[in-house]
Image (tube, grey):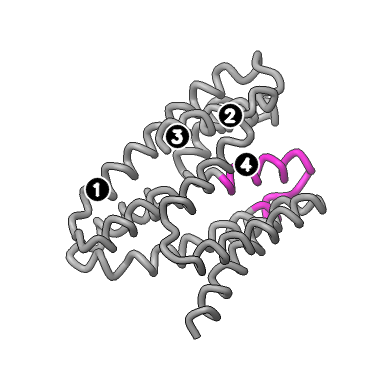
Amino acid sequence: MLLTSVVVGATYGVVARQAGLSVFEASASSFIVFAGASQFATLELLKGGAGSLEIAVAIALINARHALMAAAIRPFLSRASLAQRLGLGYILTDEAFALGIGWFRRERREISYYVTFGVGLWACWNLSTIAGAVLGASFDHPERFGVDFAITAVFVAIVATSARHRTDLAIAFAAAVVAGALKLAGASTLAVVVAGAVAPLLALRSRA
């Protein structure tokens, strides 16, 4: 996952430069936002001429899933101070959550595992963004190397390592179908939001 974040982060840097962002703006996005899906969505919205408010609302909806992940991992952080939890929230990503919740479910309570992976992912993402942004102006059509599939591969890996029951796989498949259908329909940003809402609703219904 760390190696994949390097590939995806560099791709983001390249695409950000080609979308008109400066090296500083591209790297600042990774430093402040640190959320690959919403960063790529921002570029699509910028290229489509969206305004600041429209982008802010779209990104808030896309990142709303982090609230669910944070709520799920919170019970395992009872010994962490408020300052520590704020720091842990900053490095909370889909990958960090998947590995962290798996660690805690194995009756481990040390947060060092989560922190080490989260900080490592942050460093890989930010450094590779800078590298991609520096080279971005001279690197055309990165998708021809298949790097545009890298972020999809990460989520497939997350599902493969996190699913414990058939129900988990069924929910993941349903969310993938919804996201894929919306993507094909041209609603890329909406695909993330709707699929992100469908999955937890199905999970709640399966446990009812």
Ranked by sequence position, the earlier of labels 1 and 2 is 2
- The residues tagged by marks 4 and 2 sit, at their Cα atoms, a distance apart of 10 Å
Return the residue at label 4: 40
Which residue is situated farthest in the right direction here? 185
**SS for dot 4:** helix
For mark 2, does the 10 Å Cα neighbourhood hold few (<14), some (14 to 19), or many (20 or more) residues? many
Instruction: Give 194 or 35, whichever is nearer the viewer.
Output: 194
**SS for dot 2:** helix
Instruction: Give 129 or 11, whichever is nearer the viewer.
Output: 11
Is the residue under label 3 in contact with that under label 4 (CB below 8 Å)? no
Rendering coords of residue 176 (x, y %): 64, 56
Which mark lies nearer to you, 4 or 1? 1
For mark 1, does the 10 Å Cα neighbourhood hold few (<14), some (14 to 19), or many (20 or more) residues? some
Residue at the image point whose x is 58% and y is 43% from the top: 152
**SS for dot 3:** helix
Which residue is situated farthest in the front direction here? 166
Describe residue 37's horizontal placement relative to residue 116 as left or right: right
Main SS, magenta region, reads helix
- The residues tagged by marks 1 and 2 sit, at their Cα atoms, a distance apart of 27 Å
Query: Magenta segment range?
Result: 37-55
The amino acid at mark 3 is Trp
- The residues tagged by marks 4 and 3 sit, at their Cα atoms, a distance apart of 13 Å
Rendering coords of residue 192 (x, y %): 64, 56
Mark sitting on residue 113: 1
Residue at the image point whose x is 56% and y is 60% from the top: 172
Is the residue under label 3 in contact with that under label 1 (CB below 8 Å)? no
Ranked by sequence position, the earlier of labels 2 and 3 is 2
Return the residue at label 2: 11
Return the residue at label 3: 125
